[in-house]
Image: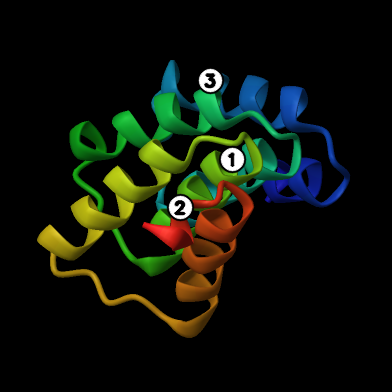
Amino acid sequence: SAIGACEDGGEWEKALQLFSMMMHSEVEPNRITFNAALGACEKGSQWERALQLFSLMPQSRLEMDTSIFKAVITACKKGGEPQKQSDLFNAMLKCEVESDTVLHGVMVSGCETDGEWKE
């Protein structure tokens, strides 16, 4: 997808512009386009924008999966937002979405970075 190409090229602004155009047209975003847009935010260290996109998921009626949560949690980790990271991980568990070893690594790494592993 074009959004995925922007993600791969580190063009988060273009990825979000394409996503926005999609949202305002008759073309509905799917899980792949959400993942690509969230990945672009993560790679561009745009954790706030990742959270904005994530908040659109319920209205899209798409099922959230591990990859969606992984992208937004990683964006929050890169943005130095351990509380948001933790809140999202807990929300993921409440939604009964399974975690994976990569996501566990992201969570541990985020706690180590912020010194929360001591608590």
Q: Which of marks 1 and 3 precedes in the sequence? A: 3
Q: Is residue 32 above or below residue 12?
A: below
Q: Which mark is residue 20?
A: 3
Q: Which of marks 3 and 2 precedes in the sequence? A: 3
Q: Nearer the viewer, mark 3 or mark 1?
A: 1
Residue at horizontal 75 percent and vertical 35 percent from the top: 44
Q: Is residue 39 left or right of residue 104?
A: right
Give the residue pinned by disc 2: 116
Q: Secondary structure at mark 3?
A: helix
Looking at the rendered structure, the kind of residue marked 2 is: Glu
Q: Is residue 29 visible?
A: no
What is the CA distance from the residue labelled 3 to the residue labelled 1?
10 Å
What is the CA distance from the residue labelled 1 to the residue labelled 2?
29 Å
Residue at horizontal 56 percent and vertical 52 percent from the top: 74
Residue 67 on image: x %, y % = 46, 64
Residue 42 quadrant: top right
Display colour scheme: rainbow
Give the residue pinned by disc 1: 37
Q: Quadrant of the C terminus?
A: bottom left
110, 28: nearer the viewer: 110
Residue 118 on image: x %, y % = 45, 60
Q: Nearer the viewer, mark 2 or mark 3?
A: 2
Looking at the rendered structure, the kind of residue marked 1 is: Ala
Q: Is residue 26 left or right of residue 96?
A: right
Q: Is residue 90 above or below residue 13?
A: below
